[in-house]
Structures are given as structure tokens and as C-alpha cells.
Image: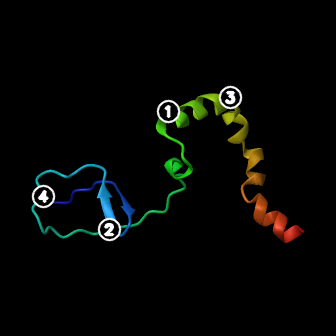
Amino acid sequence: MMTSTEGIYRNGKIELSQLPTNINDKTRVIVTFIESNDIELSAYGIDRLQAESLRANLGSFADDWNSPEMSIYDNYDSIMTVTS
């Protein structure tokens, strides 16, 4: 049987988002690290309510930000370093 669950690696430990059921202690596991583009807002002092407020206030810009034409700015800093 194979069971999957999501988690976060933090301070040398894996924190599971939910504990799997019907799994015996000392069951072998395989851990695969997946890079994420998610931003840990709490590291910037932004809590859940502030994040929801920001999302609501900035939502009107989403169509512009997500348009294909804006991809030119994805690597803006590195491009400007090379061309300067």
C-alpha cells in the first residue's frame, strides 16, 4: 500500500499537513523535495487577515500582471544587470 501526504521541511524536520491513518510506527518513507514559488508571508510580518486584505485590494491588477506581455519583467533584475 502507498499513502501520500503533504508537508513542509523546516529546521531539519518534516511537518506533515495531516497525519496519515492506518500507518504503523517505523514504516519506511521516501521524501521528495519540491521547489515552491510560494512566499512565506509570515516571514515578512503579514498575517492571514492582512494577506486576504492585500489580495482583495490588489485583485484588480491581476489581469494585467498575468498577461503574457508582462512576462518580460519576470527576470527584470538579471536582464538589467547584463545590459548595464
Residue 60 has which mark?
3
Local secondary structure at mark 1: helix
- Above or below: residue 4 compared with residue 47: below
- Above or below: residue 16 compared with residue 56: below
Q: Are marks 3 and 4 in contact (CB under 8 Å)?
A: no
Picture quadrant where residue 2 is located: bottom left
Local secondary structure at mark 2: loop
* Position of residue 53 in the picture relative to residue 17 (left or right): right
Q: Quote the CA–CA distance across marks 3 and 4.
A: 46 Å
Task: Return the residue nearer the eye: 71 or 77.
Answer: 77
Q: Are marks 1 and 3 in contact (CB under 8 Å)?
A: no
Picture quadrant where residue 28 is located: bottom left
| Residue located at (19% from left, 52% from top) | 20
Task: Return the residue nearer the eye: 61 or 48.
Answer: 48
Q: What amino acid does circle 4 point to?
A: Ile
Query: Which of the marked residues, 1 or 2, is nearer the chain's N terminus?
Result: 2
* Position of residue 40 in the picture relative to residue 77 (left or right): left
Q: Quote the CA–CA distance across marks 4 and 2.
A: 16 Å
Q: Quote the CA–CA distance across marks 1 and 4.
A: 36 Å
| Residue located at (53% from left, 32% from top) | 52
Q: Quote the CA–CA distance across marks 1 and 3.
A: 18 Å
Picture quadrant where residue 23 is located: bottom left
Q: Quote the CA–CA distance across marks 1 and 2.
A: 32 Å
| Residue located at (38% from left, 63% from top) | 9
Residue 61 has which mark?
none
* Circle 1 residue: 49
**Residue 38 at x, y = what percent?**
52, 52
Q: Quote the CA–CA distance across marks 2 and 3.
A: 39 Å
Task: Return the residue nearer the eye: 11 or 67.
Answer: 11
Q: What amino acid does circle 1 point to?
A: Leu
Task: Return the residue nearer the eye: 68 or 49.
Answer: 49
Residue 31 has which mark?
2
